Amino acid sequence: MNTTASETKSMAGLAELYQQARALGIETNIAELETFGFTIIEPEKTGVSPEFARRMLERVAAISAEEDALAVELNKHDDAAKPAFGRQLFHLLERDPVFAEAVMNPVVRTMAAYMMGMSYRLYSMVAFVKEGPARSTPMHVDSVGVPTPLPAYGAVCNVSWILTDYTEENGTLGMVPGSHRYCRHPTEMEQPKFIGGAMDDAMVTPVNARAGSLAVFTGNTWHCTYPKTTQGVRTHVATAFCRNYINPAESYDDLPDELIEPWGPELARMIGKTAWQGY
């Protein structure tokens, strides 16, 4: 269907957004997102070179080495009840210009706007780093704190930069296709089953993605991680977006102007600098 903005006034904004998706070659990814609740955008479609993913990975590694691992409560693994295993690095946007570049990528912004509306906000930007073997992360949704039933339109979404090859052995993400339509949190009985340390659950589909890919999924999509059995590093940067009435998880009030100004008014809007309320 060939449409123009003038022909689709009833869908103002969305028509232009779909035209952007068509120009970027990610129409199929939007169809997968609608059908399955997640999609993998190959490195060739992101519009950046392989060097970009390597640069972001190097910066994440440097931050991980510089920062005290135990300074973050979530990084303490002496409690088996902890929901995640591995390092989590927060407030990345202020750490290096490469992360602003990652947020402002046209494919990232198009997918965020499609899922969260044209007034979408940046919710958080967190690196997940696992070195050596690691247990799995339980099945959950990213609509944390939202009670069942979850709104079908979603309050948050996740656009993750995959920085190392993600395979089942490397502790990749596991998705439940179609679960975004359940509009609820998974129950204890629906947690993945394990046999001999490996996941054995027909509901879960492993995400196989090359470094430089984008893993995109809604805040209602059920997901977990596979146990990591390899010795190497497994890293992705989860860029979360939310609707404009949601309070972001990270504060951007202290971001320096020199980081924001090169990207024009769009980044300022995304982090709430130009919110109409004025606070």
Image: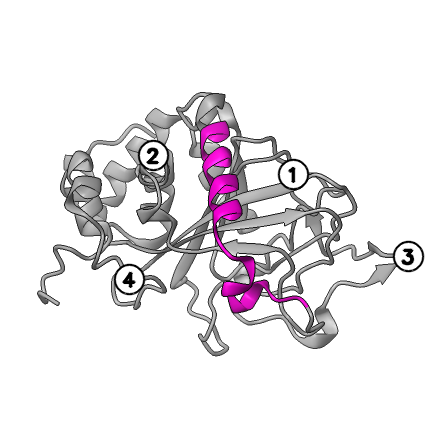
Q: Secondary structure at mark 2?
A: loop
Q: Which residues are magenta?
A: 53-77
- Disc number placed over residue 166 in the picture, else none: 1
The mark that comes first in sequence, 1 or 2, is 2
The mark that comes first in sequence, 3 or 1, is 1
- Disc number placed over residue 244 in the picture, else none: none
x 21%, y 57%: residue: 254
**Label 3, label 1: how many angstroms apart (C-alpha)?**
21 Å
Q: Answer whether labels 1 and 4 touch (C-beta < 8 Å).
A: no
Where residue 163 sits: x, y (%)? Answer: 54, 36
- Name above or below for residue 255 compared with residue 248: above
The mark that comes first in sequence, 1 or 4, is 1
The mark that comes first in sequence, 3 or 2, is 2
Which quadrant would residue 207 be assigned to in this image? top right
**Label 1, label 2: how many angstroms apart (C-alpha)?**
21 Å
- Name above or below for residue 127 compared with residue 108: below
- Amino acid type at circle 2 is Asn
Label 1 crowd bin: few (<14), some (14–19), many (20+), radius 10 Å: many
Judge left or right: residue 86 versus residue 204: left
Residue on which disc 3 sits:
196
**Label 3, label 4: how many angstroms apart (C-alpha)?**
42 Å
Name the one closer to the observer, 203 or 46. Answer: 46
- Amino acid type at circle 4 is Ser
**Label 1, label 4: how many angstroms apart (C-alpha)?**
30 Å
Residue on which disc 4 sits:
251
